[in-house]
Image (spheres, grey):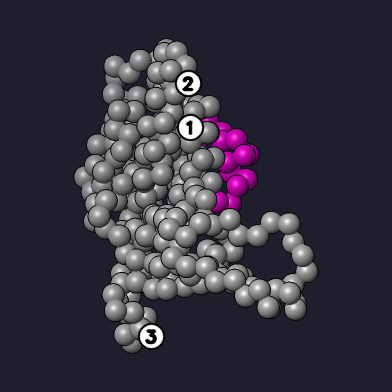
Amino acid sequence: MVKKIYFAGSIRGGRIDADLYRRIIEHLQRGATVLTEHVGRSNLNLMEQGRQRDAAIFEQDTAWLRQCHLLVAECTCPSLGVGYELALAEQLGKPCHIFYDKRRTQLSAMLTGNPYYHIHPYESEDELFSLLDQAVNADSVLHDVRITAVRQVTHNDLMERYENPIEHTCDVKVGTQWTSVGAQRPHGLCQEAWKSMKPFVESLARGEGNFYDGWMKNPMSAMISCNDGFRPMSFLLEVDDTQH
């Protein structure tokens, strides 16, 4: 399974580092798929293209962000778009690696002060490529894991006896599916349900199935319920390499 990388670099914010972006992309492509290889091209249109065309660019780029295993950003040249991509990648749970030439710029505290981001200052291109290799190869390639809400049980007698009335309960619908990429919580999946399944998703992503010595007919799967004792939802977890 080939790792998919979203490379982020300045486009409308300035193309002074366009040649560097191209060399970074070519370096990454030796062992991975770069979804945004166009960022390194010299003939990009730098002008606003109207709301309709820009909306299509937005939809394509955010779709690539959801597909990728990690984001690599070269942030020496400041860019509003790259900042947005980093924030969205964090929201989606994608690993983010930020590189910048510390001889030329200082990063915003909104990046260096956020512990979620991996920050990599460099002083030469050789150092940059070495840091890139370390970041991309830090973890083995992880399998995608498909998560399906398969059944919900409601214990009305327990709710009546023990639960205080609440206004909002689980709104997950049976049949809903998500895909965990890079063993990260998919966007839109309940955080409390994620806490219950996270160790199993991480194991499946690493290719470590066969829980409890033959528990599941499909050894690369697991059946996990959320931690709501009154109305638990059961989730089927399965390794899913169909996208690769």
Q: Is residue 144 positioned above or below 76 on the image?
A: below
Q: How many marks?
A: 3
Q: Position of residue 64 (x, y in %)?
A: 37, 39
Residue 131 position within the rendered picture, expressed as x and y whole percent measured from the top left: 38, 48
* Amino acid marked by disc 3: Tyr
Q: Amino acid at mark 2?
A: Gly
Look at mark 2 in the image and give the residue it sits on.
13
Q: Quadrant of residue 214?
A: bottom left
- Is 153 rendered above or below residue 53? below
Q: Quadrant of the N terminus?
A: bottom left
Residue 57 x/y as whole percent: 39, 25
The answer to whether the residues at label 2 and label 1 have Cβ atoms under 8 Å apart is: yes
Please tell me which residue lies in front, 211 or 108. Answer: 211
Disc 3 is placed on an element classified as loop
Residue stretch in magenta: 102-118
Judging by the rendered image, the residue that carries numbered circle 1 is 82
Q: Earlier in the sequence, mark 2 or mark 3?
A: 2
Q: Which residue is mark 3?
A: 212
Q: Could you say where residue 77 lies in the image, as x and y percent from the top left?
A: 47, 27
